Image: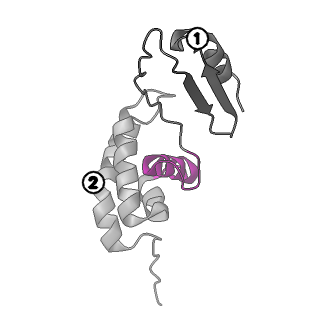
C-alpha cells in the first residue's frame, strides 16, 4: 500500500519566513474580542511579507482575505502612476507698486483644468483683487 503526501500551496522556504507572523495572527485570533478588527501593526507586517513572499503565499499562511491584503498592499505603494497629483500652492510675494507711478499690475491665474483668469489693474492694488480671485478659485474648471 502506498501513501500519498499532501502538499500545501506554500513552499517550505516561504512558510518558514511566514511562520512567526502566522503565530502572531493565531495568538491574536485566540485572544481577540468578537468583531475586533485586525490591528494595524499586524496588517503592516503582513503587507511587508506580501512584498517579499507574494500575495497568495502570504494570504494562505496568515489566513487573510485576499482582497483586503491586496488593497492594503496597493495603498502602501502609494498612488498609481497616471493619476493627477494634487495642485501645489505656491505663494509669490507681491511686488509693491510705487505710489503715484504709472505702473500697472497684471495677475494671471490658471487652474489645473485649463481655466484662466487674467486681471489687469491700473489703479487698485492687489488687495482689491482678492474677492475676484477667491471667486475664481472656488469655481471648479
Residue 111: x %, y % from top left: 63, 34
Would residue 37 appear left or right of 82 to someone viewing this image? left
- Report the label total: 2
Residue 24: x %, y % from top left: 31, 45
Vertical position of residue 66 compared to residue 95: above or below: below
Vertical position of residue 135 compared to residue 79: above or below: above
Span highlighted in magenta in the image: 63-84
Q: Which mark is residue 20?
A: 2
Would residue 134 appear left or right of 1 to someone viewing this image? right
Q: Nearer the viewer, mark 2 or mark 1?
A: 1
Q: Residue furthest bottom?
A: 1
How many C-alpha atoms fall within 10 Å of the one at disc 2: few (<14), some, or many (≥20)?
few
Residue 132 location, quadrant = top right
Task: Let me know if residue 79 is in the magenta part.
Answer: yes
Would residue 45 appear left or right of 4 to someone viewing this image? left
Residue shown at 36%/32% (left/top)? Answer: 31
Closer-to-camera residue (27/94): 94
The kind of secondary structure element at disc 1 is loop
Residue 57: x %, y % from top left: 44, 64
Residue shown at 42%/27% (left/top)? Answer: 92
Residue 125: x %, y % from top left: 53, 11
Q: Which mark is residue 37?
A: none
| Residues at marks 2 and 1, CA–CA distance in whole angstroms | 73 Å
Closer-to-camera residue (53/7): 53
Q: Which residue is mark 1?
A: 123
Kindly indicate whether the residue at mark 1 contacts the one at mark 2 (C-beta within 8 angstroms). Answer: no
The kind of secondary structure element at disc 2 is helix
Vertical position of residue 101 compared to residue 112: above or below: above
Closer-to-camera residue (52/105): 105
Q: Earlier in the sequence, mark 2 or mark 1?
A: 2
Would residue 100 appear left or right of 45 to someone viewing this image? right
Amino acid at each position: 500500500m502506498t501513501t500519498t503526501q499532501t502538499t500545501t500551496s506554500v513552499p517550505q522556504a516561504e512558510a518558514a519566513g511566514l511562520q512567526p507572523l502566522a503565530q502572531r495572527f493565531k495568538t491574536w485570533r485566540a485572544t481577540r474580542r468578537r468583531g475586533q478588527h485586525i490591528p494595524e501593526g499586524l496588517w503592516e507586517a503582513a503587507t511587508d511579507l506580501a512584498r517579499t513572499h507574494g500575495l497568495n503565499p502570504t494570504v494562505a499562511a496568515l489566513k487573510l482575505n485576499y482582497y483586503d491584503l491586496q488593497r492594503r498592499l496597493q495603498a502602501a505603494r502609494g498612488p498609481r502612476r497616471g493619476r493627477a497629483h494634487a495642485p501645489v500652492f505656491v505663494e509669490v510675494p507681491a511686488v509693491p507698486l510705487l505710489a503715484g507711478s504709472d505702473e500697472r499690475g497684471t495677475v494671471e491665474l490658471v487652474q489645473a483644468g485649463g481655466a484662466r483668469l487674467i486681471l489687469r489693474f491700473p489703479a487698485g492694488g492687489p488687495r482689491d483683487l482678492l474677492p475676484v480671485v477667491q471667486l475664481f478659485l472656488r469655481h471648479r474648471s
